[in-house]
Each structure stands twice: as structure tokens, then as C-alpha cells.
Image: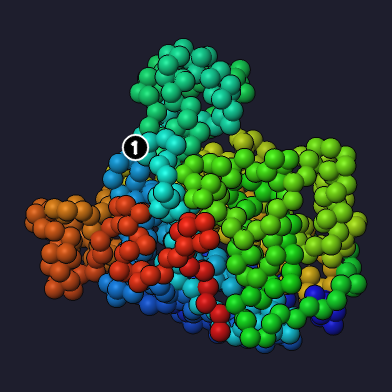
Amino acid sequence: MGPLTALHATQPLEEATVHVSGPRPLTGPAAGHLRALGATAEQTAEQAEGQAGPGRLSLTVPGLGAVSAETAWADVLTDANGADDEATVQASTGVMAVHGRREGAPRGLAVDYAATCASVLTVQGMLAALIGRARGGGAERVATGADRAALLTVSQYLAAACAPEAEAVPVSPGGPPFTASDGTRFELEALEPDVWAGFWRELGAPSEAIRSGWRPFQFRYATACAPLPEALHTATRGVRWERIRQAAAAAGAAVCPLHAMAAPAGSAAPWTLETGKPWTTRPHLTPAPDDPARPLAGITVLEAGRRIQAPLAAHLLGLLGAEVVRIEPPGGDPLRGMPPCCSDVSARWLALNRHKSAVEIDIKSPSGQAELRDLASGVDVFLHNWAPGKAELLGLDADAFQAANPGLVHAYTSGWAGRLPDAPIGTDFMVQARMGIGEAVRPLDEPPAPSLMTLIDVLGGLLGAEAILAGLLLRERSGHGVRVESSLLGAAETLTTAAGHRRRPAGFRRPLPTADGWLAPTDASAAAARSQRTSLARLTNQQALAALRTQGLGATAVTTDLASLPADPRLDGALGRDSHGCVTVPSPWRFS
């Protein structure tokens, strides 16, 4: 992969122009990110405030030509009434089912989550196509959909629901946040059982409640619910917030009160890119000209990531053709065995890590550190999501890697990007609490509460892949190695910006019960559908949908059981199975 040295660009899309039209939920984040990467909006068509029709973007880059993209609400959903907007996409794909597990009934996310993720995927597809162009191949058109994005965001939950084994803990209503006696609502993070137990012992909680509460709390990242003993909630309601802070400090736990939505804390871009040393020695690699869907073929990604954020970013690069090699501790990633399993491999782990190879290295040892640096000297991308300061402590920071490999794209997917000095530990639910996501995702008649669906980890992974693709394109156009950093903070800011930093009205995107299930009206039809709530509750789903459609109102059935999705006629066989028998979701993009 050789640099286009004639351009000497300082930004990936320097001198590029972008034209945008269509619904703002589908195009707004994409247009903003393209501009942050250096593109200039010229003759931009009017972006619709409503949600009808697809979003369209056209990007022209000197020396690389033009790439166009179309982002639809429904790209794999075949029923014309199955996904007309954000609400019906969430309903059809299982997003409402997962987000509603804490309450025991489907709930719509009040923010345009599927559309925001689709918009980021659109940028990824366009950047990947341009990288392919720079390498002598590439596509001219990219298509994606909010439905494809939504299926990706629930892929872990879907894989687990369709596995032959049962969950390790019950999938039942319940979970944080907790409430102090003075009314402060807060999130708790404890990554180890002794920390968890120490916190609750400080508050005088019963020993049995402490013991039985650990597993559902630990697994809440996997199940999107946490049926905790009521005695734990009683324990926090009996003391003031200051006492809870003291208990957390004594035990080594982290607590964070639920904040209101706020404007971005710093840069509008959700990532940073910085060029490093010149890079002129690598050969130019050309992808197979007959496979525009694999523009990263021949590129190697070395990933040292755990849980969701970094593994998902690398997974997306793998879907674009890159070879991904995981760095795992001696004995392998312990999450490989996390139940439920398919052919003895965790279904959730497969959702993010299938088709990756792995190398076991003890990065805490000097020999392991040397081995990792040696491996990184021959790859295109090194990606990690280690805790702040760990890379420097181990002698594995960006300087160390780029000294041996000046052409490396060094990527760090962090929690806070060092922008909030008073921030708590950078995990999904703590970031949701600190950044006001609990307000963004729930309408005015529901108390603010972070979603137990891993919204920020997933969006953070998408932004990590976007940043790496931007880094690869900048490397092509500048002839220099590149450092990129994305963060969960950037993901939270992207989502609250999409929400307009305001809460939605009462009842927004709340599904309506029928005699045999639930239905979700489109946002435009919701008021008229809610006025018929009593009569609709006496009808079956099929009858209720027919009644609404005869009135010209849009609605779709709500998926309440993710295990039913592979046979859902609305998806028309779009879901597949891998070699382990684990359910797979379709690629986020179509290239041509």
C-alpha cells in the first residue's frame, strides 16, 4: 500500500467536496464527520427535516474521483411497511426488545440510534471505497440501511438468543440505576467481585443479597438487564449520596450520578488524527478488481482489545477485507467461553470475533512486549483499548510502535480521550450516566436512566473503525504514519448531538399492546395510533396493523423474541449461520 506522495494531504479528505440530501437523521452525522475530515460542502441539497426517503451523499476527492452513498431506512427488510423510520426499524430488528428488557416490555429508544449508527457506517463505506481507489481498485457506490445498522447493534444479543444453550443468568426485568435517600440517582461500576462485595458491605446490605446480586450485575453488559435483589436498592435508599460516595471510595468501586444532557465537552469531531513520520518503503498492494466489497484486502490489523469497543472496530475492518489478528493473553481470551455457546465457543464472542486469527502473548513480560512490537512492525494497523496509562507503563505506546514501523496507523479506542479530568471509569454505563444519555434515550414521562443495551460501546466501536479508515486514507494521501484516537465520550456526544440535547415528549416511541403482541407506529402516525389504543388492544397484531394501514397510518409488529428473527418474513432470510452454527447478521454495506 503505497502513499500518493503527490498530494501531501494533511487531512484525509483535503480538497474534497461533499453533496448531501435526504433525512437529517440519516445524513446529519455523516455530513458532519465528512466535513471534520476535511471535505467542503458545495451545492449541498436541502436536507429534509422529516424522515421519508433515503439519504444521499456524493463525495469527490482530487486524484481519487467520486464515491456516492445511499442510506435507506430499510435495505434488507422486505416488507414495505416494516421499516419506514427510526421507530419501525427499532421495532423490527429487536432494538426495542433489548432496550426494554430492564422494564420487562419493549421500549423504543427516544434518540435516533439506528439512524446515527447507519450514518457512521455510511462514512466508513465511503472511506473504504476511497482506500480501494487509492490502491487501484475500489467501488463507485456504497449502500447501507438503518436496518442493517440496527441488526449489527443487536448482533451479540441475537447470537445469544439463538444459541442452543441457555443464558448463564435470568433475562428478567430489573437493574440500575440506584437511588440515594436524598433522591440522587446513580450508576455503580465494580469490575471485580471483591470490589462489589466491599461496596455493599459498607452500606450494610445483607450478605445473601450481595452474593446473589453479583452475577446478574456482572452479566448486565451481555443480557441488557440485571434482576438484582430488592435489598440492594433498599440499602442505597437508606443513605445519602455522600455516604454512597464514601462507600465506593473505601471499596474501590466507581459511582456516578446521572447527569443532564450537555453540549459537547470539546472538539466536535468524535476522534483525533495526527500524522507522524514519513512512510515510503511499503509496496503498493492492489485488491482484486472483481471484489469491490473487500477494499482492505491485503491490509493487516493487529488488535489488542477486549469486550466490545475495539473488537467491534476490528470486526468491521475484517468485513471490509482486512486480515485481523487478535492478541490474547496466555490461555486465550476468557470471554471465548462466556455462555451461551455454539460448538463450545461463546455466541457473543463469535458475533465480534469470528474469522479473526489469534496469537497468545503475555504483554506483561519483557519478552512478550518485544514479541508484540516485532509483530506490529509488519502490520498496517495496531488497535487497542487498554486502560489509560497501561501502554506507557508497558513500553507499548505509539512512539514505541511507530519507531519500528513509521507507516503504522496506531489506533486507541479510549473511554474519555483525556478530555474530562473528573470523569469516572470509562465503561459504557458510566459514560451514559456522566453524559446524560439517560435523558436522551427516554421520553419525559420516564425517569432518566441509562439503557442497559450497550449503546455507547457499540457506537464507540463504529467510530473507532471510522477513525482507522480515515487514518488509512490519510496515510495514503500524506505518506506518513498516523495516530488516531476515538472514545466512548465521542460516541456519547455524537448521540446527544443527534438528540438535539432535548428530551422527547411523553410516550414517545412507546409500543402499543395488542391481543397477541405489540405494534410500533411510525413517529408520524404515533398520535393517531395512540388515540385508538383501547380498540387496538382487542385486536391481534395482524388485525391491528391492517386497521391502521387502511387509515394510511404506518406501523409494524414489534419483535419481542430475538430467537424469532431468523424466520421473520420481513427479513426474508437475511440472517445466516457461521461454521459454529451461530447466527450472523448481514454486512453493513453493499458496494458496486
Figure check: 111 above or below 549: above
| Residue 77: % across, % down | 36, 71
Which residue is at a point 51% across and 61% down the rendered structure image? 578
Question: Is disc 1 placed on a helix, strand or loop?
Answer: loop
Query: Which residue is farthest front?
Result: 343
Which residue is at a point 12% across and 67% down the rendered structure image? 547
**Which quadrant is home to the N terminus?**
bottom right
Q: Which of 298 and 180 is in front in this view?
A: 298
Q: Is residue 558 left or right of residue 9?
A: left
Where is residue 323, by image quadrant?
bottom right
Q: Which of 439 and 555 is in front in this view?
A: 555
Which residue is at a point 30% across and 49% down the rendered structure image? 106
Which residue is at a point 35% across and 60% down the rendered structure image? 565
**Which quadrant is home to the C terminus?**
bottom right
| Residue 349: % across, % down | 56, 50
- Confirm whether residue 230 shows in the render: yes
Give the residue pinned by disc 1: 172
Q: Which of 228 and 427 is in front in this view?
A: 228
Figure check: 200 above or below 29: above
Report crowding for label 1: few under 14, some 14 to 19, many 20 or more residues within 10 A (C-alpha).
some
Q: How many labels does the image show?
A: 1
| Residue 472: % across, % down | 74, 69
User: Which residue type carries mark 1?
Assistant: Ser
- Confirm whether residue 484 shows in the render: no
Q: In this view, does 164 lie to the left or right of 462?
A: left
